[in-house]
Amino acid sequence: MIKIKDLKKSFNGKRVLDGVNLEIDKGKITVIIGRSGEGKSVLIKHIIGLLKPDSGQVLLEGEDLTKLDESEWNKTRRRFGMLFQGAALFDSMTVAGNVGFPLREHTNLDYKDILETVKDKLKRVGLVGVENMMPADLSGGMKKRVGLARAIIMDPEIVLFDEPTTGLDPIMSDSIADLMLDTQEQLKTTYIAITHDILLTYKIADKIAMLHNGKIIEEGGSKDIKETKNPVVRQFIEGNAEGPIRVY
Amino acid sequence: MREFLEETGRKTRTVVEISGQIGLMLSQALMWIFVPPYKWRNIIKQMEFVGVQSVFVVVLTGSFTGMVLALQSFEALKRFGAESMVAPTVALSVARELGPVLTGLMVAGRAGSAMATELATMRVTEQIDALTTMAINPTRYLITPRILAGILMLPILTIIADFVGIIGGYVIGVKMLGINSGVYIARTVDYLTFGDIMDGLIKSAVFGLILTLSACYYGFYATGGAEGVGKAATRSMVLGCVLILASDYVMTSMMY
């Protein structure tokens, strides 16, 4: 569904993406793993057009997204949803206001219909009766759930997850993983997640790709990654301080 | 010498870059004013924030300014036996200069810095990116209503500041300094023209644009977490106030 071809990006002379090549399959969960600061967020931001590459292509069903202008992007972005690392909920709005926001901006649905849809999506992510709460009153896990409800409110074809379990305890992380699997199963959506949470990765991924030094150095299913001989990938998935990746 | 030239070059480039970004932001924000559908709810919310919530501080500033002007000018004019000229001195100073300038500075301090803080927080917590991913133009949603609110509400606040400033001057002049009430009012009406008030209001609209644009620029392009939020608020306040005073000089020299 999405093909990333030789994607390069530098910031202030520092090369962050150095020719990323990756294929993302429709209706599957692809997880991009890598150390912090390796450019995972930069990569995902290229997929949804928050950043422009120095060179390379991001093809969505053959259409090069890097060539789109802002008005074309605004049409294409309606096919996407995104859950941000900190959920990025609007502080000034209630949960219902946040989740229903895309519907209010992009559809002619009346308040009652929007609220019904909001309640339905919140129920799908395991939240009931929180519509009138403010984001400041929610726990980290609840924020992620509300963020996911907002990301799927427009029934997008592709949902991007930026570190979906960062900052959560292991039990809550596991419940977010279950939630991702459940919602993906229900909606048959293409999920792309970036994370350094290996447990989450093994649990949800149909395909895993590891980003290191600006390139995808290994990709495959959970079994392939677990059995890889690549010493860099092994060091990362085993969480060893000793190995080819130098710890600063 | 080389270091000096390099530093000067760097600073010049920064100034040019900032000017370019501000110009681009302004042109895009103004363009969205004319593109329906209009975001009335956002605009009214910002008008309430910039305007209604600033009334109290503007009333305080305006009234004390009028009062102190009456006291100061009375002392000076008494030496020439022209005590009754306190009235036009207060009225003209407030309407032409102090009403719009002090209103602009007070709103820059109250609403401008809060605006910059809010936008900077939205930036560092990825709320602005979230808007973009939801196919909502952040300039249209966040910047245009704020700039519009500044341009529309500053003149209204300035009318309030002018009114309470003149009343403040009247109270001190008549009740404390013993100037005849009828004379005070007559002098005010004789000297204060509609043009004086209008010039002040035009200035205030420009100040509204300047302070909101400064706040939006520093808030929108904030980087660096909590420290970045603080810097955005401070810089927007400093730039806003400096530009208000500088543009006041330029406009005054053109108007009178």
Image (cartoon, coloured by chain):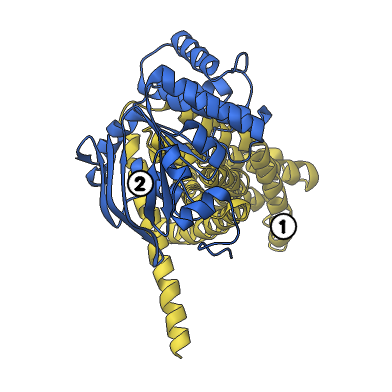
Residue placed under numbered mark 2 in the picture: A46
Number of other residues with Cα within 10 Å of mark 1, as a class: few under 14, some 14 to 19, many 20 or more: few
Letter of the chain in blue: A
Q: Which residue is mark 1?
A: B72
Which of the chains bears the disc numbered 2?
A: A
Residue B191: image tag: none
Report x, y in % for residue B191: 53, 47
Q: Residue at 64% x, 41% y: name it.
A: B58
A84 shown above or below B75: above
Give x and y (percent) for residue A24: 32, 38
Q: Is residue A52 above or below residue A1?
A: below
- Tell me the residue at 48%/37% (across/down): B149
Q: Is residue A127 visible?
A: yes
**Label 2 crowd (10 A; few <14 / some 14-19 / many >=20):** some
Q: Which one is in front, B27 or B232? A: B232
Residues at marks 1 and 2, CA–CA distance in whole angstroms:
63 Å
Where residue A177 appears, x then y in whole percent? 54, 29
Q: Amino acid at mark 2?
A: His
Q: Is residue B42 above or below residue B243?
A: above
For this orientation, the residue located farthest to the bottom is B1
Chain designation of label 1: B
Question: For chain B, what colour was chosen?
Answer: yellow
Q: Quadrant of residue A60?
A: top left
Asked whether residue A135 appears in the rendered view, the answer is no
Q: Residue furthest right?
A: B176
Describe the element under mark 1 as helix, strand or loop: helix
Q: Nearer the viewer, residue A243 or A28?
A: A243
Side (left or right) of B187 relative to A208:
right
Q: Quadrant of the C terminus of chain B?
A: bottom left
